[in-house]
Image (tube, helix red, strand yellow):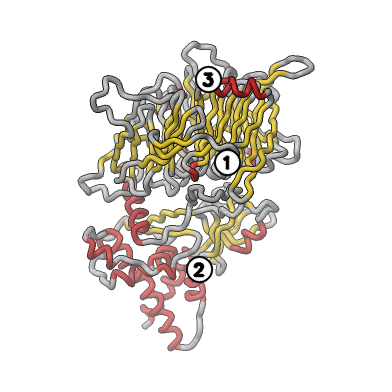
């Protein structure tokens, strides 16, 4: 009896120790950890006390995580951890109650063991998959946690109903958060209620990072944990057949939407948009096409004339406007999950609605040539860079024009324009919105500066970060070729094609700015010299743990690191696409919304899919990525 009580006490102490979370602050504002009964998850996937989170919460709804020190948002309570705490802490002198509590603890840990054993031997038959349907009633609404065993050889003798085991997976896996026999992989999501969206009738739905609830998605998450970043299944689809053609068709630019739902192919006079199926084993489907004349339709054999109610604006008279439209050519494009935006010669900018077979809804003619363009993931803002002249002094200035699209009952009725004047004469060569559409990052052409503008209030933009200049006058230098912000809006990835200019990851320090006149200076976090100095494109995983790079030769690299501010990182070569002499012709890269797949589209119109959640490493269709020697 004494041995049983001793084992029960040890079990209770170990569980309480595992439930120790950041709970309070001392007089020196140091974080104190202790067992808590109000476990709460934040968007970085860490768990803290809800009372501490309420104390640290700022006016803008964010807080600094006491564990990883990142700016995060509150997700929701972790009910399984709270129930475990109440179960363990419920100490009574009643013998019957004591035995009942001990039985519950033992059954809880037996369910953990059976769950781990079940996960390590995932059946492949359809009959076994039907038995693996979990109970969604016990799922957390904000996050899902998957436990994979590192040492499960001693658990093979335990057996139970697979259905009941999987139904207890969230609660049991949460209880082993700090156990040495399991590793925890979290998939957290930020609240999407604060993101501005353009709800257009008939427009394509915008995918969001949502909780994983279906059994198929649970298996996908398990496969991803086992495979990423070393193993993946590779798919390749060609949008244009080369049969009986002397030369394959090439495009001047390609783009993939932020949700990896569409990709666009741009030629000087035509454009095409394809829809990417959710199932990577299916080829892309042609969504809509169009021409520079404004004609649009589901394919080139069934084109319609541009509508008469297209909103047209510009600073030129009617005759000049028609002359520009007669012979303009496409140069740049950007695509969201709702709209395609194309800019070209003579300062022409046009917006197409993907929900209405590519119908043009907005046309603008600028007096200055457009050097770069981007549309926000929320489909509300269109930004492009120009070099304008001061009317009084005649001096040139780098300008960013932003157009806010306003809709009423699904129809565009007004566009508000805002000019962002930068304190440099160096022209803008790259603009890029953050995933939450609150920040606009840009870079200059000659001095290779990169800056960040806060555009949460589009009518009052504010410069919040700028870097020092780096001058490279070599003929082969392209300067900064891509700039992307992580989902947490803290880190940024900057790529270049220049001498001794490897890709870098910087901390923008925007969260440290105070006051209206403060402009942050970025801090170098990581220099990725392993991938070389000729990187054209980069793509950030929504999990913030991986970055994909595409170099001039078409080699696709993948860098994986659990924390971007740590030195531990791994590099792999995952694919090979068509090469590109200039950045504009390089392949586009984008991760799926759940981070399971990496999509690539090159200038030949070929879609490459690298699925890291298609199976287990032992499956015959799964191939290994080539590790990059450091």
Left-right relation of 35 to 560: right
| Quarter of the image that includes the N terminus | bottom left
Mark 1 neighbour class, 10 Å CA radius: few under 14, some 14 to 19, many 20 or more: some
Q: Nearer the viewer, residue 264 or 84?
A: 264
Q: Position of residue 26 (x, y in %)?
A: 66, 58
Which of the marked residues, 2 or 1, is nearer the chain's N terminus? 2
Residue nearest the viewer, comparing 218 with 57: 218
Judge left or right: residue 47 versus residue 26. Answer: left
Q: Which residue shows up at 47% across the image and 68% down it?
A: 80
Q: Is residue 596 above or below residue 442?
A: below
Q: Which residue does the image show at 56% across and 30% down from the upper left?
A: 373
Give the position of the C terminus as an image quadrant: top left
Q: Secondary structure at mark 3?
A: helix
Q: Is residue 141 above or below residue 65?
A: below
Q: Of the two numbered discs 2 and 3 on the same chain, state the one appearing first in sequence.
A: 2
Residue 311 x %, y %: 62, 36
At a point 46% along the width and 33% down the height, the residue shown is 290
| Disc number lying in front (3 or 1) | 3
Q: Give percent across and percent down for residue 297.
A: 44, 38
Q: Does the residue at mark 2 contact the one at mark 1 (Cβ under 8 Å)?
A: no
In the picture of the structure, the residue carrying the numbered disc 2 is 79
Which residue does the numbered mark 1 point to in the structure image?
A: 490
Q: How many marks?
A: 3
- Position in image of residue 313 (x %, y %): 65, 31
**Disc 2 versus disc 3: nearer the observer:** 3
Q: Name the residue rendered at 63%, 49% in the picture.
A: 408
Q: Nearer the viewer, residue 597 or 325?
A: 325
> Is 364 situated left or right of 515 in this image?
left
Quick check: 170 above or below 559? below
Kindly identify which residue carries mark 3. Answer: 327
């Amino acid at each position: 009896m004494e041995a049983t009580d001793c084992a029960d006490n040890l079990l209770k102490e170990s569980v309480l120790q595992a439930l120790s979370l950041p709970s309070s602050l001392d007089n020196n504002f140091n974080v104190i950890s202790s067992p808590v009964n109000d476990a709460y998850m934040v968007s970085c996937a860490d768990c803290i006390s809800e009372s501490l989170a309420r104390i640290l919460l700022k006016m803008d709804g964010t807080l600094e995580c006491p564990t990883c020190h990142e700016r995060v948002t509150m997700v929701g309570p972790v009910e399984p951890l709270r129930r475990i705490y109440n179960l363990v802490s419920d100490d009574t002198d009643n013998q019957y109650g004591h035995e009942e509590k001990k039985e519950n603890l033992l059954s809880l840990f037996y369910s953990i063991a059976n769950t781990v054993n079940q996960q390590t031997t995932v059946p492949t038959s359809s009959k076994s998959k039907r038995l693996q349907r979990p109970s969604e009633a016990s799922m957390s609404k904000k996050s899902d946690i998957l436990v994979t065993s590192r040492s499960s050889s001693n658990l093979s003798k335990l057996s139970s109903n697979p259905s009941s085991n999987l139904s207890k997976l969230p609660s049991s896996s949460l209880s082993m958060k700090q156990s040495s026999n399991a590793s925890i992989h979290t998939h957290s999501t930020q609240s999407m209620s604060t993101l501005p969206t353009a709800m257009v009738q008939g427009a394509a739905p915008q995918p969001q990072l949502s909780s994983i609830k279906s059994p198929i998605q649970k298996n996908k998450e398990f496969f991803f944990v086992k495979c990423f970043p070393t193993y993946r299944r590779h798919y390749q689809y060609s949008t244009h057949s080369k049969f009986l053609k002397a030369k394959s068709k090439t495009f001047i630019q390609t783009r993939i939407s932020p949700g990896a739902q569409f990709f666009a192919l741009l030629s000087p006079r035509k454009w095409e948009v394809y829809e990417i199926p959710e199932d990577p084993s299916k080829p892309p489907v042609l969504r809509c096409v169009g021409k520079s004349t404004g004609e649009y339709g589901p394919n080139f054999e069934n084109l319609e004339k541009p509508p008469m109610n297209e909103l047209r604006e510009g600073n030129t008279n009617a005759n000049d406007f028609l002359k520009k439209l007669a012979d303009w050519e496409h140069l740049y494009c950007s695509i969201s999950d709702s709209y395609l935006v194309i800019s070209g010669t003579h300062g022409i900018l046009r917006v197409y609605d993907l929900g209405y077979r590519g119908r043009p809804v907005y046309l603008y003619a600028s007096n200055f040539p457009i050097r770069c363009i981007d549309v926000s993931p929320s489909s509300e803002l269109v930004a492009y860079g120009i070099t304008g002249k001061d009317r009084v002094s005649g001096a040139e200035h780098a300008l960013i024009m932003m157009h806010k699209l306003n809709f009423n009952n699904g129809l565009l009725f007004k566009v508000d324009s805002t000019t962002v004047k930068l304190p440099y004469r160096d022209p803008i060569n790259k603009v890029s919105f953050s995933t939450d559409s609150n920040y606009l990052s840009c870079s200059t052409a000659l001095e290779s500066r990169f800056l960040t503008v806060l555009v949460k209030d589009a009518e009052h933009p504010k410069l919040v970060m700028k870097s020092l200049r780096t001058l490279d006058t070599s003929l082969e230098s392209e300067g900064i070729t891509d700039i992307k912000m992580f989902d947490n809006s803290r880190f940024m990835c900057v790529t270049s094609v220049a001498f001794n200019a490897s890709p870098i990851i910087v901390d923008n320090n925007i969260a440290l700015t105070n006051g209206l006149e403060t402009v942050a200076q970025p801090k170098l976090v990581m220099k990725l010299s392993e991938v070389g100095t000729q990187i054209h494109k980069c793509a950030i995983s929504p999990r913030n743990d991986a970055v994909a790079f595409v170099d001039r030769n078409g080699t696709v690299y993948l860098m994986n690191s659990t924390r971007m501010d740590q030195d531990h990182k791994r590099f792999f070569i995952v694919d090979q696409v068509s090469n590109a002499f200039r950045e504009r012709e390089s392949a586009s890269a984008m991760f799926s919304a759940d981070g399971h797949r990496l999509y690539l589209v090159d200038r030949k119109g070929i879609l490459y899919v690298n699925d890291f959640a298609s199976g287990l490493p032992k499956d015959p269709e799964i191939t290994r990525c080539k590790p990059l020697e450091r």
